[in-house]
Image (cartoon, rainbow, N blue to C red):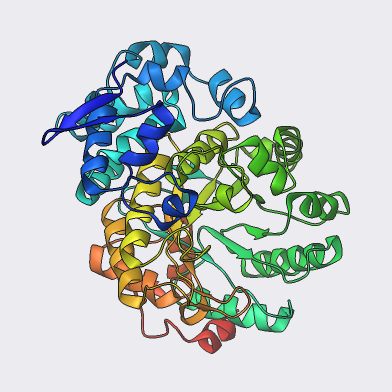
């Protein structure tokens, strides 16, 4: 395998595939912080040229964290579809990119190979793509997932209703829920980030949201995004959980920093099977974000994009209903500005879809990043064009508990209108019954939470 090339008379040699992957990526402040980024645009081009000629089989044989040292690598490798992998192992990364973007390639063609891909392969492909390539490629990789609602269908765009409250006060949470529902938001999940990560708080919030869902006969699911062990304790006490949530990393060490391992994820999956398996509904929910491994020094010298792709390869093994990248949440240490945020969101959505995940994006930024509302809206428009499954729905786009800027109820409503998209079909029928939507468009009572409450 040749890991050297010459650009404009200057020879570049790379010590490993891991180094090639790191230096072939677009500029990210996190990779520069880790000391692994390309030192110049010329070196970046050289790394891309080398990466284009790498065989997919080489990426499988040389993961960025070794099989012997990392259970994430072992889980991904052990769950690869051997037939699919054998059919593509001699492809180069460039051939994978050309296959995805070729006019004659359709979803059925991609589905034949996607479970033979590792995270490293998806990351390598993304590094050779422009932003438009990432949109075009992701649009081909539609992934449909079903729980109480069906997400990912053509012509549909869903949203998570995120009614966080700085004191976990149920009246404030309900007020946000009613407002969100009045804009047609909530078909992905009603998902709360709790202030207090205790079984008692989680059980209370699950019980209250479940009661609201039942009282409204609302086709959706609830989730409280506490640590997975806290959720399991609440479920053991009888709390009605629609989805089971956990943040994950792309390495065993990173997951240990989150307080999880593969055994714990399998235990949670078994609990979910007991709750929802008979209905044939999916129930796992994972969140990720570029740079989380570097935060815990668990990146093993690999770049943040490749580590993020490994998260998706791991998540795939648990058949989730929802996955989303909280793209700008960690801050400028890893994504310095709006340009890097937009690039990361498009990369992550493409890689997850290529690997077969029902992917949404929390298009967001923190207030100390060099990003603004226009950057966020640019990203959401590009992601909607790329066929993203869902966005977040936060009152006014300003999360008063997590203190970051995300997508508002209005944003998803506007994106649906711009692109001619509708909510999940089960949820749209509910909205039609209550006069909030007609023929795919919001009515005059949309946004009036009081009017919605009067109909209940």
Relative placement, left or right, of 11 versus 368 is: left
- The quadrant holding residue 105 is top left
Relative placement, left or right, of 356 versus 108 is: right
Camera-side residue: 375 or 169?
375
| Quadrant of image for the C terminus | bottom right
For the image shown, how many numbered marks are present on the structure? Answer: 0
- The quadrant holding residue 106 is top left
Question: In the rendered view, would you say 52 is above or below 81?
Answer: below
Which residue sits at x=28%, y=63%?
A: 381
Question: In the rendered view, would you say 10 is above or below 431?
Answer: above
Rendering coords of residue 404 (x, y %): 52, 74
Camera-side residue: 178 or 412?
412
- The quadrant holding residue 1 is top left
Relative placement, left or right, of 304 versus 211 is: left
Question: In the rendered view, would you say 28 is above or below 13?
Answer: below
Rendering coords of residue 405 (x, y %): 47, 75
In the picture as drawn, the residue positioned furthest to the front comes out as 10
């Amino acid at each position: 395998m040749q890991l050297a090339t010459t650009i404009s008379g200057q020879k570049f040699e790379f010590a490993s595939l891991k180094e090639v992957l790191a230096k072939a990526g677009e500029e990210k402040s996190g990779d520069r912080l880790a000391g692994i980024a390309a030192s110049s645009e010329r070196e970046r081009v050289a790394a891309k040229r080398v990466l284009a000629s790498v065989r997919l089989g080489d990426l499988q044989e040389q993961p960025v964290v070794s099989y012997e040292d990392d259970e994430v690598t072992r889980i991904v490798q052990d769950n690869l579809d051997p037939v699919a992998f054998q059919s593509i192992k001699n492809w180069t990364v460039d051939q994978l990119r050309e296959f995805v973007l070729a006019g004659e390639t359709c979803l059925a063609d991609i589905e034949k190979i996607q479970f033979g891909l590792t995270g490293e392969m998806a990351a390598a492909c993304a590094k050779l793509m422009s932003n438009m390539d990432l949109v075009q490629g992701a649009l081909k990789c539609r992934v449909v997932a079903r729980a109480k609602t069906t997400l990912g269908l053509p012509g549909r765009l869903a949203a998570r209703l995120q009614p966080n409250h700085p004191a976990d006060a149920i009246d404030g949470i309900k007020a946000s829920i009613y407002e969100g529902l009045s804009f047609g938001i909530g078909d992905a999940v009603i998902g709360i980030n709790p202030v207090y990560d205790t079984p008692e708080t989680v059980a209370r919030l699950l019980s209250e949201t479940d009661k609201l869902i039942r009282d409204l006969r609302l086709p959706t699911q609830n989730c409280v995004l506490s640590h997975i062990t806290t959720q399991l304790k609440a479920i053991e006490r009888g709390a009605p959980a629609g989805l089971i949530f956990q943040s994950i990393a792309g390495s065993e060490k990173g997951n240990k920093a989150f307080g999880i391992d593969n055994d714990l994820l399998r235990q949670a999956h078994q609990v979910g099977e007991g709750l929802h398996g008979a209905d044939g509904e999916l129930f796992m929910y994972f969140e990720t974000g570029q740079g989380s491994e570097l935060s815990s020094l668990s990146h093993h010298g690999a770049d943040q994009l490749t580590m993020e792709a490994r998260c998706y390869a791991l998540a795939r093994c648990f058949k989730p209903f929802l996955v989303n990248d909280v793209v700008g949440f960690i801050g400028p240490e890893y994504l310095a500005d709006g340009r890097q945020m937009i690039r990361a969101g498009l990369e992550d959505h493409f890689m997850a879809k290529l690997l077969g995940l029902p992917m949404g994006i929390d298009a967001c930024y923190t207030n100390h990043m060099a990003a603004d509302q226009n950057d966020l809206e640019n990203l959401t428009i590009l992601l909607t064009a790329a066929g993203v499954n869902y966005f977040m729905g936060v009152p006014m786009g300003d999360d008063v508990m997590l203190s970051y800027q995300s997508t508002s109820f209005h944003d998803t409503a506007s994106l649906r209108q711009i692109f001619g998209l509708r909510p999940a079909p089960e949820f749209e029928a509910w909205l039609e019954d209550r006069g909030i939507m007609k023929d795919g468009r919001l009515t005059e009572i949309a946004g009036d939470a009081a009017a919605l409450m009067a109909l209940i």
